[in-house]
Amino acid sequence: MNPEKLQTPFYRVKEKDLLYDINLLKEALTKNWGNYIMGYSVKTNSLPWLLVYLKEQGFYAEVVSEMEYDIAKRMGYSDDRIVYNSPIKDRNVWEQVLLGGGYVNLDSSYELLWMEEICEMYPDKVFKVGLRVNCDIGALCPEEQLVEEEGGRFGYCYENGKLKEAIDHIEKLSNAKVAGLHLHSSTQSRTVKVYGALAKMAVNIAREYALDLEFVDMGGGYFGGRDDKPNYLNYFEEIGKELRAYFDPKKTKIIAEPGVSLISRAMSFETTVLDIKDIRNRKFIVTDGSRVNLNPLVTRHVYPHHMVYGSDPTERVIEKNQWVCGSTCMEYDRLFEIVDDVALMPGDRIVYDTAGGYTMCLTPLFIHYFPAIWIEKIDGSLYQAREPWTNEEYMQKYHWEL
Ligand SMILES: *Cc1c(COP(=O)(O)O)cnc(C)c1O
């Protein structure tokens, strides 16, 4: 089928672009370290097709909830291919992953108590866990733009001694061991430098507390899919260089847990112009996709896109201004303004590039339900990975007897 004929709105995932970034990650990790695990952050986009695809590519599932763990299991990930993070953990999942040989990065006070319990329950087993590190990135990299000015809220704080307390707590147990450090921290500016600083932090902590680590988990938060920004090769060159100061690739693995950097190049959101409305001195372009499909948190003002005109644009008039609007009947559902450019017409397509990474899963069920998802395979064929939701799906689990 011709993708130009598909009913809009829909998300498209291009396998070719997805493979490009997967291979870039593999190359970066192979070249710069050699001994590694690739995790995929399920929260970023839990599309079942994608989870199966990445599993076949050798990825582990990095999960942060019971639901994510469950879907990863359903998509065929075994417990030893799970990385379990987050400060809100489910006790049963936590035990299953630990007993099944997966990776667990502790992040909370209650998990230290759970460690005492599990060690007592299984005295013949040795439980190896990672600890999520909270360190002052603002102090390490003053020019870095942080996501939150007050600093991160995850992990055990290095500076005030909480991390050391957690390490001591684990090491006191006869059948538990601190086997890894987890350094995921997302910054706004995602510079290579900040990953270098985080790797150096892992080195300093391991050295200071004499840790013998099986893994250093560098987390996610990288740029990806943008040629004007650093890529995996740049990040892991820096990380490898810093880690080598203390760690040996033969003994210590790097875990990477990318999310959006792995998939954003491959994803687009495709919409159609339905109507042109002349309101006083403005032209409003009504489309069948919405800001909620692209930016439900309504924080963005830039939407990279390209047009697929339904007829020759060189034969059209130039409009002074056109406001492209979404489909939700909310005034704020306006996407971008086109200034001094070709007049849009009903039937034209507006394709939002690098769109849908996080938002496929962040999209609310507001006025319209979840749009279709199509996979464009390497050979150009199309595969429907999600049918659009209807009331059949929406009305599940509701009750309306009076
Ligand atoms: C969200 C998250 C990731 C992935 O982040 P991206 O910015 O999508 O790469 C990786 N690890 C953890 C612990 C996360 O919370």
Image: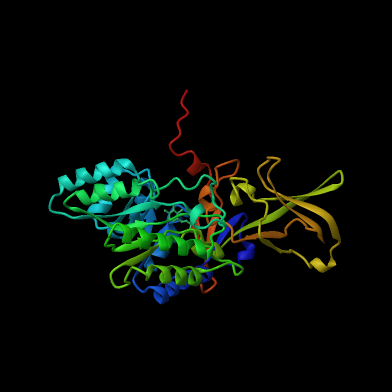
Judged from this view, the residue extending furthest toward the left is 124
Judged from this view, the residue extending furthest toward the bottom is 31
Q: Quadrant of residue 83?
A: bottom left
Measuring 64% from the left and 50% from the top, which residue is drawn there? Answer: 300
Please provide percent x and percent y for residue 324.
Answer: 73, 52
Q: Quadrant of residue 90?
A: top left
Q: What is the quadrant of the N terminus in the image?
A: bottom right
Can residue 399 be seen at all in this image of the molecule?
Answer: yes
Q: Is residue 369 left or right of residue 56?
A: right
Toward the viewer: 265 or 140? 140
Please provide percent x and percent y for residue 198.
Answer: 44, 60
| Position of 15 relative to 401 (above/below) | below
Please provide percent x and percent y for residue 373.
Answer: 53, 57
Q: Is residue 351 left or right of residue 165?
A: right
Which quadrant of the figure shows ligand 1?
bottom left
Colour scheme used in the picture? rainbow
Measuring 36% from the left and 74% from the top, which residue is drawn there? Answer: 34
| Position of 58 relative to 292 (above/below) | below
Toward the viewer: 303 or 46? 303
Q: How many marks?
A: 0
Please provide percent x and percent y for residue 384.
Answer: 51, 60
Q: Is residue 31 left or right of residue 382?
A: left
| Position of 377 relative to 109 (above/below) | below
Toward the viewer: 56 or 159? 159
Can residue 76 be seen at all in this image of the molecule?
Answer: no
Toward the viewer: 91 or 191? 191
Q: Is residue 107 left or right of residue 126?
A: right
